[in-house]
Image (spheres, grey):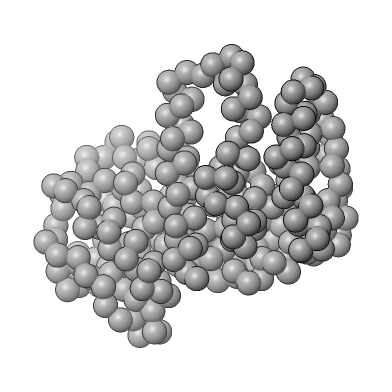
Amino acid sequence: MPDIRDDLSAALSDPDPVRRAQIQMHKPLPKRFYKTVSIGPAEDGGHVILLDGRTVRTPAKQYLTVPTQAAANLLAAEWDAQKEEIDPATMPVTRLANTAIDGVSKDIRAVFDDILNFAGTDLLCYRAGEPEGLAIRQSERWDPVITWAAETLGARFILVEGVVHQVQPRAAINGVAEALRAYATPLGLACLHTITTLTGSALLAIAFAEKQLSAEEAWALAHLDEDWQIEHWGTDDEAFQRRENRWREMQAATATLDALR
């Protein structure tokens, strides 16, 4: 049995969902080549995924290893759920683990810093001046997260009206950095980076990690403006499907982060 077949490698590892879709459209889905999925011990004390007793490898030929049994269960469930064909689109946890092992582990600091860069332009800090109803809703729902960050993390952010960039205090960014250090493993940062990029908010990602918000609450706060527009103007099927695809990525990242606890 091959490790992970070459025609799966790009689709299982590319972080760009559009690129993954393009790859998958141009290649037929590979047939399922294994009967049983199990979990075994890794040399470093973690857990590996076994297909017919053989250890799965990442696209870069590293062992697909995760540190906890709960995370391994998520991976095993994805591989076991594949039917006659293997569809990478239904394996977001596997892609996340591949990214952590093959990418994040090679430059943890760069991913850490990228999350902090998001904090410097955090979604929750940029407020609408109008319509009044949207501005009020933003204050009611976003302000509790801003207050929690200030009181718990020591991260006091400046709120601005509009989209003109506001340089945030160094102390605020340092507060986020201190909280982020608790999750500074390759898979932990891969999860938080995914949550941050999907929501546009490092504060929402940290608030979820610190159990201040559920995944559903963080997602709703990230889409407050969009939902306001939908209430007043409606949506279309294409936009709805894009959001559903991104929500599945969010669910994978939040479930994996929970599984690392």
89 lies left or right of 2: right
Residue closest to the eye, 40 or 212:
212
Q: Can you name the residue that lies furthest to the top here?
A: 233
**Which of the 4 quarters of the picture holds residue 173?**
bottom right
Q: Is residue 106 visible?
A: no
Q: Is residue 255 visible?
A: yes
Q: Residue at x 57, y 21 (%)?
A: 230
> Residue 162 location, x and y as percent?
82, 30
> Residue 53 location, x and y as percent?
17, 73
Q: Residue at x 57, y 45 (%)?
A: 217
> Residue 221 location, x and y as percent?
63, 40
180 lies left or right of 84: right
86 lies left or right of 58: left
Q: Residue at x 19, y 65 (%)?
A: 37
The N terminus, quarter of image: bottom left
Q: How many marks?
A: 0
> Residue 104 location, x and y as percent?
53, 64
Q: Residue at x 72, y 31 (%)?
A: 137
